Image: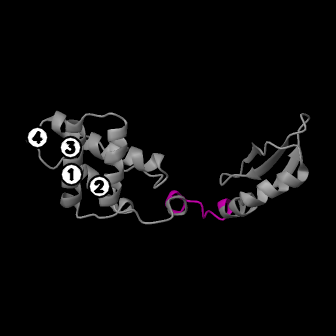
Amino acid sequence: MKIYKEKTGIYYVSFLSSAGKRKRKSLETKSLKDARELSKQAKIEELEMAARAGALQRDAIAMIVAGKKIKLSDLIEEWKKYKTNMAQSVNTIYTQESLIRAFIEFSKVSYLDGVTKEMVANYINQDTKAKAGSREQRHSAIRSLYQYAIAMGYTITNPTKLVAIDK
């Protein structure tokens, strides 16, 4: 890790990524003392060493970012308030909540970090007689919950992203 000043007088920090490429980030200050402090607070040197050691894998980052186990039942209540505040239809919220709760029961999962793409795929495509539109509704409901969880910083992973809907 290196701290340096550009011609503009702004300090930057440069560091090696896990791929071994040098990256740089503006510290948005013209004071060397502040630049050092910001770099220290951001733990850039420690993160650089962890990246070199291969310790910054997606799962590890998710645990660091989320920091705590989130119960799906609690998340649903938060998500419903958000959807209501966004003026979404009461019927849409009810339908999506019902589909999410059915997913939880089907998958026997209680926590956000316990959901896998296989669980989502199995739930969405469980009924081969169901029309593609019904399977898309299931997928959309779970995807909506995960989009909210990501926006709130509860997780960085979205198991619905890699799920294909059987046609």
What residue does disc 2 label? 118
* Amino acid at the residue labelled 1: Tyr
Disc 4 to disc 2, C-alpha distance: 19 Å
Disc 1 to disc 4, C-alpha distance: 12 Å
* Amino acid at the residue labelled 2: Glu
Which residues lie in the magenta part?
Answer: 51-62
* Amino acid at the residue labelled 3: Tyr
Q: Disc 1, disc 2: CB below 8 Å?
A: no
| Residue under the point 11% across and 40% down | 130
Disc 3 to disc 1, C-alpha distance: 19 Å
The picture places residue 85, in percent across and down from the top left corner, at 36, 39
**44 left or right of 134?**
right
Q: How is the image coloured?
A: one colour
Helix, strand or loop at disc 4? loop
Helix, strand or loop at disc 3? helix
The picture places residue 51, in percent across and down from the top left corner, at 66, 59
**158 left or right of 32?**
left
| Residue under the point 88% across and 47% down | 4
| Residue under the point 20% across and 43% down | 94
Helix, strand or loop at disc 1? helix
Disc 3 to disc 4, C-alpha distance: 20 Å
Quadrant where the image shows the N terminus? bottom right
Q: Is residue 15 above or below residue 133?
A: below
What residue does disc 1 label? 123
Helix, strand or loop at disc 2? helix
> Going from the N terminus, do you reach mark 1 or mark 2 first?
2
Task: Look at discs 1 and 2 and give the one toward the viewer.
Answer: 1
Disc 1 to disc 2, C-alpha distance: 9 Å
**114 left or right of 11?**
left
The answer to whether residue 53 is magenta is: yes
What residue does disc 3 label? 94
